[in-house]
Amino acid sequence: HPGMRIRITGHTDSRGSDEYNLALGLRRAAESKRYLVALGIDESRIEILTMGEERPAVQGNTEEAYALNRRAEFEIIS
């Protein structure tokens, strides 16, 4: 689907400063993009964002909650 565009948003757990988590989320999204580009997807079709710790998948301060909140979400945008 060469016309499809993808948005990758990086997320983190709540540990660390806001600044650190925003940077970490951006690195997570960028690594995901690099992986897809290595598989042959044109990088111009992929945009990246970071949410840091702003939108947790689950609430809580357990290792399980932290693990679920460290993620990259993929969204088809066109």
Image (cartoon, rainbow, N blue to C red):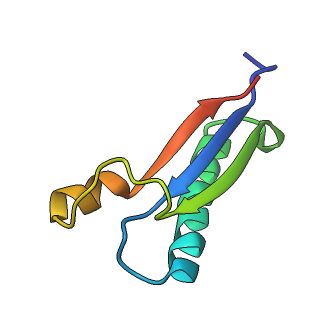
Q: Is residue 4 left or right of residue 44?
A: left
Q: Residue at x 75, y 22 (%)?
A: 4
Locate residue 38: give its quadrant: top right
- Work out which residue is located at the far top of the displayed protein and give it: 1
Q: How many marks?
A: 0
Q: Residue at x 58, y 55 (%)?
A: 29
Measured along the vertical axis of the image, is residue 32 above or below residue 53? above
Q: Nearer the viewer, residue 27 or 22?
A: 22
Locate residue 49: give its quadrant: bottom right
Residue 31 % position (x, y) = 57, 58
Q: Residue at x 61, y 45 (%)?
A: 8
Measured along the vertical axis of the image, is residue 45 above or below residue 32? above
Q: Is residue 31 left or right of residue 71?
A: right
Residue 3 % position (x, y) = 81, 19
Locate residue 44: give its quadrant: top right
Quadrant where the N terminus lies? top right
Residue 2 % position (x, y) = 78, 20
Residue 77 % position (x, y) = 72, 28
Q: Residue at x 75, y 30 (%)?
A: 5
Q: Is residue 36 left or right of residue 66?
A: right
Quadrant where the C terminus lies? top right
Q: Is residue 14 left or right of residue 25?
A: left
